[in-house]
Amino acid sequence: MNFATKILCAALALAGASMGAHAQGYPSQPIKIVVGYQAGGPTDLTARLIADKMTRSMGQPIIVENKVGAGSNIASEFVAAAKPDGYTLLLAAAPISWNPMLYKNVKYDVLRSFEPIANVMTAPQILAVSTKLPVKDLKDLVALAKRQPGKLTYGSSGAGGSPHLAGELLKQRAGIDIVHVPYKGASGALNDLVAGHVDMSFMTSMSAIPHLASGNPKALAVASEKRLPQLPNVPTVAEMGYPGFEAESWNGLFAPAKTPPEIVSRLNAEVNKALQDPEVREKLTSQGAVVVGGTAQSFRSYLVKEVERWGGLMKTNKVTLD
């Protein structure tokens, strides 16, 4: 081994020792979880729920900060550019997987700009219809849409969101022509669905379940692998003739790329610990969410599938910000 090689090895060893020492002392200051959505919304509430439990467990304050705008891209870009030391994290939702394909000049890539920590929860999309629409199930709805191409409308919480893409997936799989009506938020879409101004809508389970007990709107199907315990009588879209039809929103925790693996591992353990707390589980499941957790690697694998699935759909259906 020549002198230059010895110097290089010594430097790498010193860097490794420094990283290990840094991880062992982590956390030594408050941690920030950035959320790209408004305070009080589902993603914000999820962030505050786990932040509270992690604060108690980790011995440092974990502060939730809302950076709203550009379809959550402002928050994502802020964290992607942050120092990878475990003190600036991102609690993101599903659009982080496809926003770089939807918006111009996005400065991040979900698979390259971040270290996935853990998938916190999922919220399947529920297909609901106005009671004014003369259908009793999904098969009736598809038959009606085929008899009246281009006439039926579906509302969503906004162009490029999970409900919008779920509607596009239904169009593709069922071979129907229905018209997208984007709103500025889930409440606007729900109000017009109840009033019958739009015929149908996909809504996340967390948005839909509190309103379905009244019978208007009427749930036709849930876009998940299994039926939801909260809606045992509502079949899955797959049961109604479209196998493999899954569309869900989700919340996951990320750190900037190149965050030391020891810190990612610590954070993953803390998130999983929080998700095992009975209070956390009850609050999430009562709102229609499915608690996930698991390893950082399983979350990365899930993200790869999300990017492939929705990226392909967006190209095929020419999904744009209309």
Image (cartoon, grey):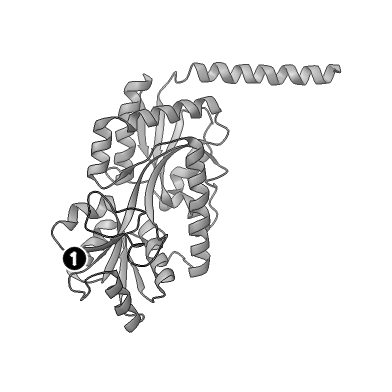
Whether residue 35 is visible, yes or no, is: yes
Q: Quadrant of residue 181?
A: bottom left
**Which residue occupies 37% across, 65% down?**
167
Q: Is residue 92 left or right of residue 126?
A: right
Residue 175: x and y, percent? 42, 75
The residue lying toward the viewer, choosing from 287 and 195, is 287
Residue 29: x and y, percent? 43, 20
Query: Three-letter amino acid code at disc 1?
Result: Val
Figure check: 90 above or below 128? above
Figure check: 31 above or below 172? above
Whether residue 148 is visible, yes or no, is: no
Residue 108: x and y, percent? 54, 46
| Position of the N terminus by quadrant | top right
**Which residue occupies 29% across, 65% down?**
201
Outermost residue, right side = 2
What residue is shown with label 1?
194
Q: Categorize mark 1 by other alpha carbons within 10 Å: few (<14), some (14-19), many (20+).
A: many
Q: Is residue 122 left or right of residue 230?
A: right
| Position of the C terminus by quadrant | bottom left
Q: Is residue 84 left or right of residue 38?
A: right
Residue 168: x and y, percent? 41, 66
Q: Quadrant of residue 158?
A: bottom left
The residue lying toward the viewer, choosing from 92 and 121, is 121
**Which residue occupies 40% across, 38% down?**
34
The residue lying toward the viewer, choosing from 38 and 312, is 312
Figure check: 19 above or below 42? above
**Which residue occupies 17% across, 70% down?**
131
Q: Quadrant of residue 162?
A: bottom left
